[in-house]
Amino acid sequence: MTATRLLAKLEDFRLLPFFVVISMAIGIGIGKVLSISDFALTPPIDAIKAIAGGTFVLSVPSAISLGVPIGLFAMMYPAMTNVRLGEVGAAFRSPRQLGVVLLFNYLVAPFLMLGLANVFVSDPELHTGLVLYGLAPCIAMVIIFTFLAKGNTPMALVFVALNSVAQMLLIPVYARLLIGNVNFDVLVVFESVVLYLGLPLLLGVLTRLAVTRRGGEAAMERLKPGLNTLSILGLLFTLIVMFSLKGDLILQRPGIVMEMAIPMTLFFTVMFFMVLFIGSRLGFSYRDAVAVAFNATGRDFEIAIAIAITAFSPTVALATVVGPLIEVPVMLALVWAAMRLSKRWFGEPVVGADRSVVPESLPM
């Protein structure tokens, strides 16, 4: 019964901020004790390649390097089990929603982040890291935020896939325009798409097909509480890992976090509410507007970190690592805010906005 009560508390959306804060504190504590930032961390994709090739050497840094993809998979997989191929096809036929996403991702976001960096960040390397963070639209976590806010997950998936292709072409252009001469391997973008999006999507769709073939939609409904809990646990685990990676530096140099926190919080807040409001004025449904807003707001921290490590100084890399430590809590706050605004802006009250449950899976 104790385990059941604990799982129920994890699904209580009002308590999620407390679990988030606890996870962040645990991560910082781990980072402080182990001084993880002193380790030469193996990039997650390289660690997975080493496992596949039989050359993986188990150590504290190599094990920690696998934490982020494991946590992201646990977050993403439950959302992907809700994807119906028919709904994905319908999302492709949403040109206005797609137009808003592309407009804000490629004509607004990079320049808004540049402007905020110019105003709030004086250190040239932190400035470069912040601008770099604003270049790439998110390819993974926006799906889980859309899922938690009861948005249109299939639509979010389609937009993420299109952004994944677009950014392979456009990131080098924007990096050259806003930062200067930057050389990096675009294969990194492709590998990240496969790891953080393709794998959970494939397994999620296969799970749905297998379960519904055996027991119909009723069987899938019975799995939803467990899948929702897995998603929340994945989120909390990811927070612990990310904060542990730089926990000692956060305590040693809190000024860096604060200097990055102000412009990044402003960026995510302004982008999200601007796009959500525009969606309401254009007549989008709540589910569509949430998918559009999160896709236009979230940033691809995996790509930003990979580029910073390979093409810039450690300080620039540190700036991009601090990014998701700020982004995830802010985006969770935006999930709550979107649900609270659903009735006022869209006339569509959302179950979970004023009650104690984590948003349920999308309507079937």
Image (cartoon, rainbow, N blue to C red):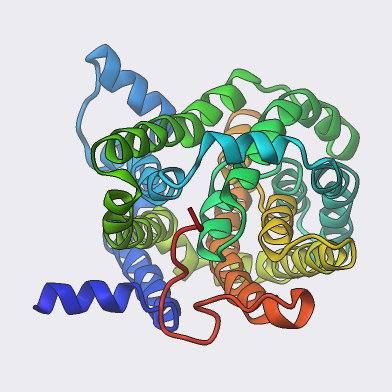
In the foreground, 85 or 358: 85
In the foreground, 107 or 321: 107
Please name the residue shown 60% across and 61% down the image: 327
In the foreground, 20 or 77: 77
- Residue 278 place in picture, x, y as percent: 87, 64
Do we see residue 308 in this rendering? no
Please name the residue shown 83% across and 47% down the image: 110
Considering the image in quadrants, where does the N terminus appear? bottom left
- Residue 21 place in picture, x, y as percent: 42, 76
- Residue 49 place in picture, x, y as percent: 36, 19
Rendered position, 6 above or below 70: below
Q: Residue reaching furthest top? A: 53
Q: Residue reaching furthest left? A: 1
Do we see residue 123 in this rendering? yes
Give the image quarter of residue 107: top right
How many circles with numbers are drawn on the protein?
A: 0
Does residue 242 appear to the left or right of 299 in the view shown?
left
Does residue 61 appear to the left or right of 325 in the view shown?
left
Give the image quarter of residue 14: bottom left
- Residue 293 place in picture, x, y as percent: 73, 58
Does residue 340 appear to the left or right of 61 in the view shown?
right
Rendered position, 364 above or below 263: above
Rendered position, 190 above or below 137: above
In the foreground, 307 or 217: 217
Give the image quarter of residue 264: bottom right
